[in-house]
Amino acid sequence: MLKGRSAVVTGSTSGIGLAIARALAREGAHVTINGFGEAAAIERERAALEREFAVAVRYSPADMAKPAEIAAMLAEAETAFGAVDILVNNAGIQHVAPLEEFPPDQWDRILAINLSSAFHAMRAALPGMKARRWGRVVNTASAHSLVASPFKAAYVAAKHGLAGLTKTAALETATFGVTVNCISPGYVWTPLVEKQIPDTMKARGLTEDEVKRDVLLAAQPTREFVTVDQVAALALYLCSDAAAQITGTNLSIDGGWTAQ
Ligand code: NAD
């Protein structure tokens, strides 16, 4: 389906991003993966993707908090593969604390990585997509782009912002064969969710099991976590030709959370 296309997936050394990178590679796209982690583990993953799917896979260590590194990552991907046809803005971090105790440096970092990085990456990728008259941008937002939860001020602000940025970008690219959408997962069991459990226990005075049952899965009517492969399948669909008329949307994949 995506043979000959080239994709950049930010934050793809783990979790949802890695599942999306795998799904795109499986369909024949060359991929640039990005994110932090142990160098040997990232190299193993990169090489495995190449071997398994017979596509070229590059790794960029660009920090999504740094605009110059984002621009360089996109320029290098374009040079290496001749184009960036698909951009998945997925890198994201979380911090859980009451607003009046929320560390300002965490606020700045979350806004930079979860929101501004998508602006910088689109700014670099859209001219080529428009010139070639084909492009797909998939922004990983969240149910928190539609509804709020307490103690997640920066994350909720950034994800609402990402949904708005997506709409504007979609309108500006609509006549160029480029679509820009967000996908908004509910709780997906990944390291990002696992890491926020201790802070949520502290902020709400709950045990680990109570956080999972009464905070996380309580939000989702299905009472089940979303899987990374389900999110990747939705991202892949948005990259298909069947989705050519879907642009500017925010697609929920949240077990019914935002229907409530
Ligand atoms: P994760 O922690 O497993 O993965 C996050 C990825 O982002 C990792 O590859 C990490 O190295 C990378 N990353 C973090 N900071 C970075 C930086 N400064 N520069 C480059 N890469 C960086 O988390 P995940 O759950 O897979 O989250 C992926 C996206 O999905 C995030 O945007 C998150 O907000 C969103 N999301 C997650 C859930 C969930 O329940 N897990 C729900 C809704 C939305």
Image (spheres, grey):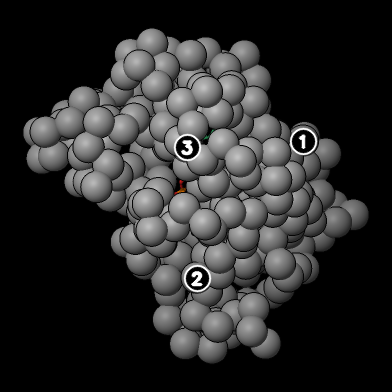
**What residue is disc 2 on?**
253
Q: Secondary structure at mark 1?
A: helix
- Compared to residue 153, the image places residue 6 above or below, namely above
The crowding category of the residue bearing disc 2, from other C-alpha atoms within 10 Å (few below 14, some 14 to 19, many at least 20), is many
Mark 2 and mark 3: span between their CA atoms?
23 Å
Picture disc at residue 80: none
**What residue is disc 1 on?**
108
Amino acid tagged 2: Ile
- Compared to residue 160, the image places residue 138 above or below, namely above
Residue 236, visible in the rendered structure: yes
Q: Which image quadrant for residue 189?
A: bottom left
Front-most of residues 45 and 177:
177
Residue 86, given in percent of the width and then of the height, sits at 43, 37
Question: Which label's residue is closer to the chain start, 3 or 1?
Answer: 1
Report the mark closest to the observer, 3 or 1: 3
Q: Residue at x 50, y 70 (%)?
A: 253
Amino acid tagged 3: Gly
| Mark 2 sits near ligand 1, with its Cβ under 8 Å away | no
The crowding category of the residue bearing disc 1, from other C-alpha atoms within 10 Å (few below 14, some 14 to 19, many at least 20), is few
Mark 3 and mark 1: span between their CA atoms?
30 Å
Picture disc at residue 135: 3
- Compared to residue 127, the image places residue 245 above or below, namely below
Q: Residue at x 28, y 50 (%)?
A: 23
Report the mark closest to the observer, 2 or 3: 3
Mark 1 and mark 2: span between their CA atoms?
27 Å
Q: Secondary structure at mark 3?
A: strand
Q: Residue at x 64, y 25 (%)?
A: 123
